[in-house]
Image (tube, grey):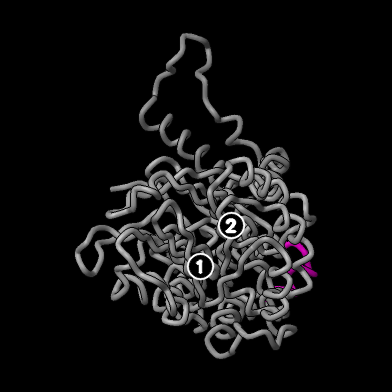
Amino acid sequence: MMQFTLFLVLSSVGLFAIDCYVYRNWKRYAKYRTWAHHSLPYYRVLMVLMPLVLPVYLAFSRWWEVEPRLLRALVIGSWLVYYIPKLIIATGIGVKDLALFVIWLFGWFQKRLLPAPVLTTSRSLDLTDMKRIPRRDFLRKMGWSVASAPFVVVGYGVFRTLYDFELHRIDVPIAGLPRALQGLTIAQISDLHAGSLFSPRPMLEAISIVNGLHPDLITVTGDFVNSDAAEVPLILPALNALKASLGVYGCLGNHDHYARVAEVASAVATTPVDLLVNAHRTLDIDGARLHILGTDNTGFYQHHADLPAALEGLVTGNEESRILLAHDPTFWDTHILPDRPDIDLMLCGHTHGGQLGVELGPFRWSFASFAYPRWAGLYQEPRSDGSGPQYLYVNRGLGTVGPPLRLGIRPEVTLLTLLRA
């Protein structure tokens, strides 16, 4: 939770800096327009108040509960309405200022380092004509390309990356894995967030990818909805289409509790998804046992998980492996790593990979990294009993929270293959 607090503080400082940057340019514009000049005192007040609105609301309210839904929507909605245009405007101004800086830098370079023409023509190749363009004319000439840049980027994120599903194939080498489970495949999807969808079609497309992999079993690791059980019908056709020879299993997420969780669970129960709420299922596979455990959500101000209840009645043996479905990755650090070395692999989601970030080969960065040290992909740590590594896989999710936007972090379908280490 300390990391989340630090993330909020850094975000507020960063947004205040962006607001100051936009205000500086707005102030220049307002100098020649009476109506805009009158807006400056109000702008200065909002600059101070708005960075505090969301952190104060999150710190001093029980916002994670179902009610008061209206207050939560008003606070978060007003915060987004205020800052999203600022981010777009700041991007446009930044591109413009960068272009002006390049022009200045080229002129400085010519004046000091290239006193003589570098070409044999009567006139050297330079940008002095651009330098002589009045600021207003320059902005007019550059305006369309500069102003369109943020909208092109955002538009790409909404209409391309948002439903550009990416398949991640992951091998998980487990020490002591029974031979009968060698090569067993598990498809994972997470964070469907039905309320973020415009229609059932995107989720049906994702499920067609899952079924096309012909996995042995399928897992859905929580957050079926955003905030209302009435959203479930958008994903019911997709959930009903899931099929795997060893079954389909799921767990609940924090957003399912923001809605009427009993209604969400009841609706999901009409589909092939076997919802494990602090429960387990044991699969007998050629003499080996695969235990699929599922806990309710714990993390992000919720404490619904009951791991002892999920393990109750579980028959142990030599030829077995245990996989846990738990929505929040922090549950691995707080409840599994310290004293549950018997859990071979935990599957989760929750972070969405931050939705905004960069993944280029070994270089990975996301906004989620401020709040979650394990925010996407496969992680391993030594077991507390020294019997080999223990694994966590964090799925990047299919849906979104907040603006329907993904940039650099594509929605994910995962296929995990169990291997003998």
| Label 2–label 1 contact, CB within 8 A | yes
Residue that numbered label 1 is attached to: 281
Which of the labelled discs sits on residue 172, or is there none?
none
Q: Which residue is at 70% across, 74% downward?
A: 264
Provide residue 84's location: percent of width, then percent of height: 66, 63
Residue 180 belongs to the span the image colors magenta: no
Q: Which residue is at 39% across, 24% downward?
A: 115
Extreme residue in the left direction: 386
Residue 146 picture quarter: top right
Provide residue 96's location: percent of width, then percent of height: 60, 46
Residue that numbered label 2 is attached to: 247
Asked if residue 150 shows in the view, the reply is no
**Looking at the image, which is closer to me, 109 or 220?**
220
Region rendered in magenta: 32-40
Tell me the quadrant of the picture where the N terminus can be found. Answer: bottom left
Q: Amino acid at mark 1?
A: Arg
Q: CA distance from mark 2 to mark 1?
A: 10 Å
Q: What secondary structure characterizes most of the magenta part?
A: helix
